Each structure stands twice: as C-alpha cells, then as structure tokens.
Amino acid sequence: MNNFSGTDALHALTAFAIQHGNSLPAHQRGFLANEMAGSDLLRRIIVGMEVLYASRDHESFPEEGVGLLDGLARFISQNNFYGLGSFDGRATKIALVAQRILADGPATAEGDVEPSTEYAAQAPAA
C-alpha cells in the first residue's frame, strides 16, 4: 500500500463494507453506513479507520479488516489529515496497533489509544 490514494482508500473501504460489513458490531456497521453516505470524502476515510479500530477486538472481525486498518491509518498519518498524523499522532499509533495484530499480537494492549468518541459509534449500554 505504498501508493495508496484517497480514491484507493474509498474503494477499499467500500469493498470491505460490502464483503465484510456484517462482521462489524451492529452499532459500528450502522454508523459507518451513515457516514459513507455523506459528502465529506476525507471524513469517510477517517471514520472508516476509526470504526475498524474500534471493532478490532470483536470476535468476528476479519483479518482483511486489520490490513485495511493498517493501510488507512498509514495513509492518514502520511498526509496528516485533520492533524491525526505525525510521528506521535493518532493515526500513526493506530497503524502500529494494526501491525502488531498482523504479526499475531493481541488486538488490544495496555497503552493503546482509546477508540474515538468523535469518529466511531459508542457501544450501546449493557
């Protein structure tokens, strides 16, 4: 994913939503669907990253989602969209979590950034 463009990001996110959308928790799936219908293309990409990140430890989350999470996070980080990039930025930290998961590490670990409260749905109260 070295030459990942905004168009590539949207195509990959759309394909993932079509093929694997049901693997996301229902509240995240609905949030992503609503955001994908919006007109802000950059926000769609950021919401996609955040929804995948918030869903990473869900029991049915597919490995393809982790690869896409890594690609989206790197893309956002490299371009510093919404100030989420830079060496110690949120997207960079999320990419590192995705890379850990891809290397058969745990989906969550102490020190991970918390899921977004702005760009992802909050889990329903139990």
Image (tube, grey):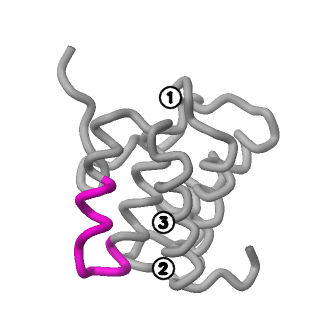
- Could you say whether the residue bearing mark 1 is in a helix, strand or loop? loop
Instruction: Tell me where the magenta segment starts and ends, as one range.
Output: 32-43
Q: Amino acid at mark 1?
A: His
Which is nearer the N-term, disc 2 or disc 1?
Answer: 1
- Could you say whether the residue bearing mark 3 is in a helix, strand or loop? helix
Residue 39 location, quadrant: bottom left
Q: Amino acid at mark 3?
A: Thr
Q: Kindly give the residue lying farthest to the front in the view shown.
A: 18
The Cα–Cα distance between marks 3 and 2, rounded to whole angstroms, is 22 Å
Which is nearer the N-term, disc 3 or disc 2?
Answer: 3
Q: Amino acid at mark 2?
A: Asn
The Cα–Cα distance between marks 2 and 1, rounded to whole angstroms, is 28 Å
Q: Which quarter of the image is occupied by the C terminus?
A: top left
In percent of the image, x 75 and y 79: which residue is there?
Answer: 2
Q: Which residue is mark 1?
A: 58
Q: Are marks 3 and 1 in contact (CB under 8 Å)?
A: no
Q: Nearer the viewer, mark 2 or mark 1?
A: 1
The Cα–Cα distance between marks 3 and 1, rounded to whole angstroms, is 20 Å
Q: Nearer the viewer, mark 3 or mark 2?
A: 3
Q: Which residue is mark 2?
A: 80
Return the mark for residue 14. 3
